[in-house]
Amino acid sequence: MKKLYTTLAGIAFFIVFIMVPGLVQADVFMKQKQHTDAFEMMGQTQPANDIIQTIWISKDKMRTDNEQQSVIVRIDKGVMYFIDHAQKIYNEMPMDFSKAFSEEDMDDEEKAQFNKFTQGMMKMEITITQTDEKKKINKWNCRKYIQNVEMFMGPMVSEIWATQDLKMDEDLQTQFLTGMMASMPGMQDSIKKAEQEMRKIKGVPVLTSVTTTVMNKTMKSSQELLEFKEGKAPKGIFDLPAGYKKRSM
């Protein structure tokens, strides 16, 4: 079961990323502070965690870095890379999750759970509601939005404070979102509705608080924008680092 849970953890990261709106414009750099409350899952207790994360985004690529790992999303290649710098290894996961494992990689129980996951993805629904609440966070004027995501793992509710003080390219944002969702099993029919919902959020998220319920357990996390700038992404930043070895999922 361990390799299946590893895959689902990666998929969960992917879902959270595509549900965060307003992040895409050619060559954008952001620095964020991320906090996760302590939680217990499958008998394992995870302590509270705080990290600083940097993000580079271009038209069809994204890279996130923190002190624990790097993640590279390559829509142009249809793959995601999870990089462990301490061990100089990486995992490769296809964005079409149905190709993440071949039949011989999973036992009967794993196949059943993976099939349940892909079928559940088809039922994922996103709803975004704009509120009249406004306040200044750090140096940006923000408006509050509520985002509800219903998926088979459980509901995910986000309180998003976004600013229009920072300008984004909505067409590139939508192209990135739909390009990622089109690779997900069963999501093709949901793209248009998701697009319409995501466009309700105007500007760049400054503070996002997320409450996720999985297996009747509640997890809370937050992301706060510290820095935002446009610029040319460093050469080769969306490529795998030289000398790193691929590890099987």
Image (cartoon, rainbow, N blue to C red):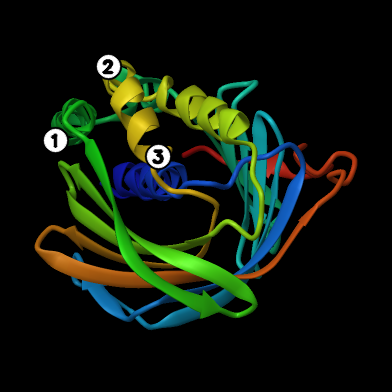
- Judging by the rendered image, the residue that carries numbered circle 3 is 198
**Closer mark to the observer between disc 3 and disc 2:** 3
In this view, the residue in front, 29 or 205, is 205
Circle on res. 109: 1
Residue at x 20% of width, y 28% of height = 111
Crowding around mark 3 (Cα neighbors within 10 Å: few <14, some 14 to 19, many 20+) is: many
Does the rendering let one see residue 207?
A: no
Q: Nearer the viewer, mark 1 or mark 2?
A: 2
Task: Give the image location of residue 200, x and y in percent.
Answer: 39, 43
Q: Earlier in the sequence, mark 3 or mark 2?
A: 2
Circle 1 crowding by C-alpha within 10 Å: few under 14, some 14–19, many from 20? few
| Residue 141 seen in this snapshot | yes
Q: Which residue is labeled 2 in the image?
A: 189
Count the marks: 3
Q: Dot 2 lies on which element?
A: helix
Residue sitting nearer the eye, 30 or 104: 30
| Left or right, 146 with reference to 139 | left
Lateral position of residue 70 relative to residue 205, left or right: right
- Tell me which residue sits at (17%, 32%) in the image: 120
Earlier sequence position, callout 1 versus callout 2:
1
Q: Does residue 69 sit above or below 19 in this rendering?
A: below
Q: Which mark is residue 53?
A: none
Which residue: 77% across, 37% down? 239
